[in-house]
Image (tube, rainbow, N blue to C red):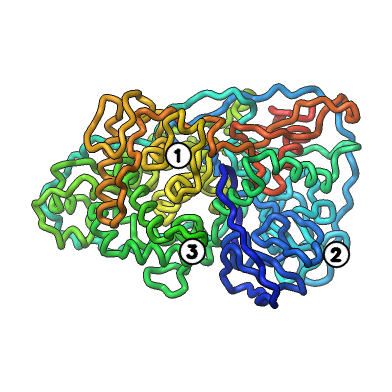
């Protein structure tokens, strides 16, 4: 079963599939279905909108199945799932990172009237009783008011929000067989969101690029060590369970007051959310397209992935086919031993949109090769040793680089720099416990950014905030990127905020880079959409010098530092120009080598970004899917408050990409309070 991460983007031609008048195949929970396939379930026919496995047809209003004409329309139920902000989407490790920091001035409202909430009643049997403060997974069954309910999506029942099963059909459906205790008591500090928080369209740029490694490490020794090389280290798995405790007391706590009289019903919230869909992008499929890009597979599927395993997902098998282990070893002979081939495959498995199967005539294998070449070229710049004189003999002097493949190479021949990627597991000069105080936007009370509320920094045993320096193949940095990535992976921002080292030491060292590659960051497209042709430039893009090609992916990653320096528009240039940054030239050189090795023709492709002006609000990739407080006046509400949220082009914690986020947005901005050190420091109820 897939979950949704989060976030947004531009248009893609929708494939129109005809449904033949014949008996459709019965839906099977174990079968993988791709876009366009039709199944029969409970007497109705459904067509898959995208890749799916395990999603019950008709159970999720915004899920992967579309009811076909002639079938009765089921009662609507929304699957409220949170998932990248981009950060990131916020900015998932995009350099520089735009970090809106201003907090909106909240218009005064009439004090809310507390409405009584019915006490939950347990059902006979093993159903857990629904309770506020608990976190529920999709499929959890609880009892409430003498009836059983099944959770449609992972979410936290925040104290005061009154999201009980009977009142929230977007989160729960009636019925279900009791078999477990139900929820994990894991209240998190965030509502059902994972976006990089922002309060107003006033933004400040934090030019904190992923570390650009250009310095040569100083070798400790220059001869082969006597220790046996570590050839195939056991792939480290990420945490298998969500945290079982509430966020630490030192973190900001989000609570809600009771809904006042006249507050919108759940059905009204759902209708208001749906009414905004047509405004999100250039066509009606924008939201579906974004949700498909942000799907993730459950860890039970990822943990079963192994090189050559027959049950590997289709995109993993494609990577194995175009990039066998021997080729991986050839490309990365000096990689840190934590960067294993198996870890790469697990990272790919988590995100079905990476190296996926295309059913519209596009060459899936060719796109996968080009996507890998693009990713690897950026790895070479972000994590490479960049040491022209580096030889296998020298590399073997470093225990963390002592791969078995090095012993098979000519010991005193310099290794080309494009093959020196993945040398750094952590930012150069950093280790766990060092750099305390860096790469942080931590909440310290009133006046703190909304990012620091929704992605609260964790502390080490000494009571110091962790440093969120670059880790993994994408050098993920800053807490407002670790939080959204953690939400995508575990449904809880606090997992990686409290244990950032996992991004380096587990298969997340590759998953973090793949997450970034598939993550829409309006007005920028995800790298996958640049590579596979989903993003096609419009006149605004063309005027800004943005065209499909490797150069656009460099802009997505580090445009504020490396791009837009002026000069001429060069296509597939071989050398440097005054307009192109050296970092960009390094990426281009590596890209040329990787594409040549993988058999990808890049003749005529725009490789540079020196003249690019970037993706702007008018770009074909720009969408309006973020949600911010609605400031409109409503004479029917106390004090004229709107009790609504409006679309925004800037990044916020709430997005239409997440079903149910509209209600979460309104709840936070009109009923939410933030407590810090026992005091209410942000009060959105006044």
The quarter of the picture where the C terminus appears is top right
Query: Could you say which is closer to the camera, residue 447 or residue 627?
Result: 627
| Residue beneath the point at 54% across and 38% down | 620
Residue 536 placement, left or right of 129: left
Q: In this rendering, would 254 be left or right of 427?
A: right
Element marked by disc 1:
loop
Mark 1 Cα-neighbour bin, 10 Å: few <14, some 14–19, many ≥20: many
Q: Is residue 47 above or below residue 221?
A: below
- The residue carrying mark 2 is 147
Upstream in sequence: badge 3 or badge 2: 2
Q: In the image, which disc is placed on residue 424?
A: none
Residue beneath label 3, please? Answer: 302
Q: Which mark is residue 93?
A: 1
Measuring from the top left, give residue 18's x and y in whole percent. Answer: 64, 65
Out of 326 and 394, give the one closest to the viewer.
326
The percent position of residue 673, horizontal first and vertical second, equals 73, 33
Query: Circle 2 sits in a helix, a strand or a loop, which is it?
Result: strand
């Amino acid at each position: 079963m897939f979950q949704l991460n989060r976030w947004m983007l531009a248009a893609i031609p929708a494939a129109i599939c005809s449904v033949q008048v014949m008996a459709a195949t019965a839906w099977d929970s174990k079968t993988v279905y791709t876009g366009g396939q039709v199944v029969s379930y409970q007497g109705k026919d459904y067509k898959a909108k995208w890749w799916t496995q395990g999603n019950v047809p008709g159970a999720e209003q915004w899920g992967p199945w579309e009811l076909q004409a002639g079938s009765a329309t089921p009662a609507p139920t929304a699957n409220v799932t949170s998932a990248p902000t981009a950060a990131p989407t916020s900015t998932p490790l995009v350099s520089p990172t735009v970090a809106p920091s201003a907090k909106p001035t909240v218009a005064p409202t009439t004090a809310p009237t507390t409405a009584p909430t019915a006490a939950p009643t347990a059902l006979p049997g093993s159903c857990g009783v629904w309770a506020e403060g608990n976190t529920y997974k999709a499929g959890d069954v609880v009892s409430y008011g003498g009836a059983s309910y099944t959770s449609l999506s992972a979410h936290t029942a925040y104290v005061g929000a009154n999201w009980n099963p009977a009142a929230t059909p977007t989160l729960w459906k009636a019925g279900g067989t009791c078999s477990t205790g139900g929820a994990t008591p894991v209240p998190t500090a965030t509502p059902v969101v994972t976006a990089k928080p922002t309060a107003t369209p006033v933004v400040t740029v934090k030019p904190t690029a992923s570390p650009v490694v250009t310095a040569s490490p100083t070798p400790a020794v220059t001869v082969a060590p006597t220790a046996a090389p570590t050839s195939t280290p056991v792939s480290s798995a990420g945490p298998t369970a969500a945290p079982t405790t509430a966020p630490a007391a030192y973190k900001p706590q989000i609570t809600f007051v009771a809904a006042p009289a006249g507050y919108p019903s759940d059905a009204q919230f759902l209708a208001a959310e749906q009414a905004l869909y047509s405004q999100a992008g250039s066509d009606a499929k924008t939201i579906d397209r974004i949700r498909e890009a942000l799907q993730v597979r459950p860890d039970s599927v990822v943990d079963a992935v192994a090189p050559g395993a027959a049950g590997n997902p289709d995109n993993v098998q494609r990577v194995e086919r175009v990039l066998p282990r021997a080729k991986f070893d050839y490309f990365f002979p000096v990689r840190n031993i934590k960067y294993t081939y198996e870890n790469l495959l697990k990272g790919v498995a988590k995100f079905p949109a990476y190296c996926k199967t295309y059913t519209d005539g596009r060459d899936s294998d060719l796109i996968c090769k080009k996507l890998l070449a693009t990713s690897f070229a950026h790895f070479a710049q972000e994590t490479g040793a960049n040491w022209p004189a580096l030889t296998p003999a020298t590399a073997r002097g470093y225990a963390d680089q002592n791969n078995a493949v090095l012993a098979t190479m000519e010991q005193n021949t310099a290794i080309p720099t494009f093959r020196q990627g993945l040398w750094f597991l952590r930012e150069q000069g950093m280790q766990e416990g060092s750099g305390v105080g860096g790469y942080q936007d931590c909440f310290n009370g009133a006046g703190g950014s909304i990012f620091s509320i929704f992605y609260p920094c964790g502390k080490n045993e000494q009571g110091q905030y962790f440093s969120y320096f670059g880790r993994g193949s994408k050098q993920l940095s800053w807490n407002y990127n670790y939080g959204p990535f953690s939400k995508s992976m575990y449904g809880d921002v606090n997992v990686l905020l409290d244990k950032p080292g996992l991004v380096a030491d587990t298969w997340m060292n590759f998953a973090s880079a793949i997450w970034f590659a598939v993550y829409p960051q309006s007005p920028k497209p995800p790298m996958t959409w640049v590579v596979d042709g989903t993003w096609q430039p419009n006149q605004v893009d063309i005027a800004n010098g943005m065209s499909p090609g490797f150069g656009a992916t460099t802009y997505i990653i580090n445009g504020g530092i490396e791009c837009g320096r002026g000069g001429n528009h060069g296509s597939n240039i071989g050398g440097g120009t005054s307009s192109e940054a050296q970092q960009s030239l390094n990426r281009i050189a590596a890209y040329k080598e990787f594409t040549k090795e993988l058999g990808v023709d890049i003749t005529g492709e725009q490789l540079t970004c020196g003249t690019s002006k970037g993706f702007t609000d008018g770009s074909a990739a720009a969408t309006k899917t973020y949600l911010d407080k609605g400031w409109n006046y409503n004479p029917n509400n106390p004090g004229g408050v709107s009790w609504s949220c409006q679309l925004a082009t800037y990044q916020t914690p709430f997005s239409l990409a997440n079903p149910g986020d509209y209600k979460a947005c309104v709840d936070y901005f009109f009923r939410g309070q933030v407590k810090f050190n026992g005091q209410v420091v942000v009060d959105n109820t006044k």
